[in-house]
Image (spheres, helix red, strand yellow):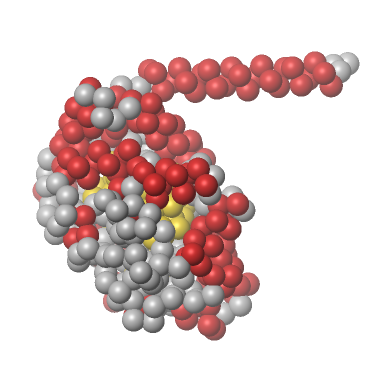
Amino acid sequence: MLNSKFLSLLLGLVLILSNVQSFSQVKDISLDEMIGQMIMLGFEGTRIDDTKFKDIKGNIIQNKIGGVVFFDRNIININQVKEFISSINALDKKEPLFIAIDQEGGQVSRLKSNRSFKTFPSAKYVAQHLSTAKAFDLYYTMAITLKNIGFNLNFAPVVDVDINPKSPAISLKNRSFSSDPKTVINYARTFVLAHKKANVLTTLKHYPGHGSATTDSHFGFTDITHTWNDLESIPYRTLIKEKSVNIIMSAHLFNSTIDDRFPASLSKVHLGKILRHDMKYKGIIITDDLQMGAISKSFDLNTVIINAINAGNDILLFANYFTLDPHLADKIIDIIKLAIESGVIKKKQIQLSYKRIIHLKRLII
């Protein structure tokens, strides 16, 4: 009979070999393909043979992107979107895609009742009217709906603490569960667990916290220097410690006391030091849409991409909503490769992001 010491040695050898194999697999992947996994794009079109979808279809087949995000413009009804996603997944590519959507409930719901989808209430309504047990059932229904259609990633829940009742992006749209961090944590955890049961990934947003902001980062510079409160970090710290996190979305929020040059989404201090080092977060970080006014009005594409990666983001999200660029994936790849060649971005950072992304995809897709 094998003794426990031998079994321990055998297990250790297996772990070493698996790590070696994992590293070898990364070495065998081309740089272009690794970078491609870090790109998620929005698009136009409602079916696979739509001429508006041609460029994104080419990006997928050529392994230039690792995910797509659906908006209202891509959704007509349940049968249409289900068939569209099925056709996308059937395209010849090396790795499966993240198929993402914003389905928070309330005002931020891409699957709308006027298109025959079930209506889900806002986060604020849920926390005020439902127990966590009933909320779990509600969010499980939401997650199963997403799963059955073909989505594997939901850009939710919002874990912003409702500090400013006049916040245009959060409170005025009832997107926060509560002004109490503990309530936010309890309902966000419920949301995540319900989606986990349905095998759908979730995203905590908007780090480091949009709940105190007086402006909306969709439209321009959003400064939280004098409004941000450490209460806003509690949901992240708690849920990270509980290992209740798949992905965290970095927001375009400026806080000069932390970084006097860049918003959180482009900041090494916000993401590298505080989120990764201090909070010990090891998972995927995705940017909020890098074409939002808070970013596009202040920085050029080269600056955005380089700083987003060096800050610690693993996935770069471009909604392609107001400024559709058919060559965007190629531009992003070229900028990153040139930055690596010049030493501005370390190749190791790309490899690390690739490994995080593939690890999560293997678990869920």
Which residue: 22% across, 60% down? 294
Whether 98 is drawn above or below 181: the answer is: above
- Left or right? Give the position of 214 relative to 44: right
- Left or right? Give the position of 229 relative to 309: right
Which residue: 19% across, 27% down? 338
Whether 200 is drawn above or below 354: the answer is: below
In front of the other: 337 or 140: 337
Q: Position of residue 129 (x, y in %)?
A: 54, 83
User: What is the tally of numbered marks visible in this picture?
Assistant: 0
Q: Position of residue 25 (x, y in %)?
A: 44, 20
Residue 155 at least partly seen:
no
In front of the other: 274 or 251: 274
Query: Looking at the figure, which quarter contains the N terminus?
Result: top right
Residue 164 at least partly seen:
yes
Q: Position of residue 236 (x, y in %)?
A: 51, 57
Whether 196 is drawn above or below 178: the answer is: above
Which residue: 28% across, 51% down? 262
In front of the other: 43 or 165: 165
- Left or right? Give the position of 59 relative to 211: left
Q: Position of residue 154 (x, y in %)?
A: 41, 57
Residue 10, located in which quarter of the rendered image?
top right
Which residue: 14% across, 57% down? 297
Residue 40, located in which quarter of the rendered image?
top left
